Image: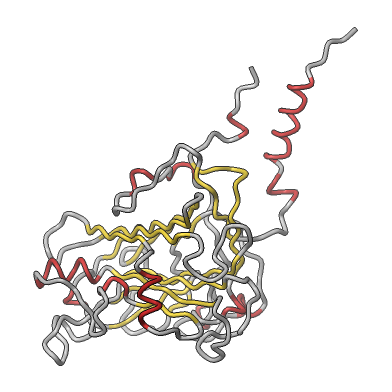
Amino acid sequence: MKHETPGLHFIALLLILSLGTDTIFAQDQFINCRKFAAGIVIIIDGDPSDWPLSSFSNPAELPDIDPAENFSSNATTNAINKVPMKTGDHFVFDPNKVLVSTAGNFNLDETDFQATTYIGWNDTGFYLLNIVTDDLIGWFQSSYIERDINNQPAFTNDGIEMWFDNDNNRLPPNINDVQTSEFDLQTAFSIDAEIIREEFQQEPIMTNGLPLEFAIFRSALNTDNEKEAEIISKIQRAVKLDNKPMEQHTSYVQEIMFPWGVFPSFEPDEPIGFNINWIDWDDATFHLQRWHQANESDTQYFREMRFTNNNPLGGVAISDWSVF
């Protein structure tokens, strides 16, 4: 009688299913926020060395934008038609795929600006790592060039902006126009605090008394500053500039962790709507580079992000398992 090993058959079946996932679920497009493997511990300090970067796969991306539709706040044809996106587990800046807020003197090429934004989660919260190369970093790029009208440090706002639709209902269509849902919110984090400490040797405090790195946080209900400050105080964040001299920086790293439950309905159990914008301030001109190719507050064009645990970051892929 032929001897068969059920265990080997089971492993072979898993291999077939795992290797064929892209084909079987080709129409299932989403931002894949993968759980970290049990042994991965992320410290929020601006150092990406504890991230399992080699475990990430393909970026989540949309098709190229028609150049005639760029440099505006209008939704692109891609966004309006909800064209299929490529499922991916991180974001990569592509000058042909981002909707830029204004032309100004912005140079749409990869020598001026590059960014890769990684995401992941564990039982504590949602993590984001933003690694940026930018040849124009510092207060000499800011809105008022070094000092504002009150002789205070101005702002550059280089950094990243995130928009959450935590109940994933794509409503209201626009957070700015119809502020009716506490589940829709905006948060942005800049590198300004580190720049101020370096160039002005002072602690960066905004006029409302909040630390400058808090930059922007608001829910669609425009809750009061005290409540928003309480929420932001629970969010861990760190910025690290490169080691070049002042006003010669060409890269920075941002690391952020949002604890589960810090926003209404923010838990890994259900998908959320999500969008990111890379913020670049060059030659006193503000550029908002929108990944989802529409106005940043248009929740109807956000893409779905799921928190998955079937292929942990930093774990061993099924295809790498030893059969024996």
In the foreground, 11 or 216: 216
Answer whether residue 283 is visible to the viewer in this image: no
Q: x%, y% of residue 2? A: 87, 10
Q: How many marks?
A: 0
| Render colour scheme | secondary structure
On screen, residue 126 above or below 188:
above
Farthest residue to the left: give it.
201
Q: Is residue 249 left or right of residue 171?
A: left
Q: Quadrant of residue 62?
A: bottom right
What residue is rendered at 32% in x and 76% in y?
215
In the foreground, 267 or 50: 267
What residue is rendered at 31% in x and 67% in y?
112
Q: x%, y% of residue 262? A: 47, 66
Q: x%, y% of residue 241? A: 22, 59
Farthest residue to the top: give it.
1
On-image quarter of the C terminus = top right
What residue is rendered at 45% in x and 65% in y?
94
Q: Quadrant of residue 178?
A: bottom right
On screen, residue 163 above or below 21:
below
On-image quarter of the N terminus = top right
Q: Quadrant of residue 197?
A: bottom left
On screen, residue 218 above or below 131:
below
What residue is rendered at 58% in x and 55% in y?
307
Q: x%, y% of residue 175? A: 53, 84
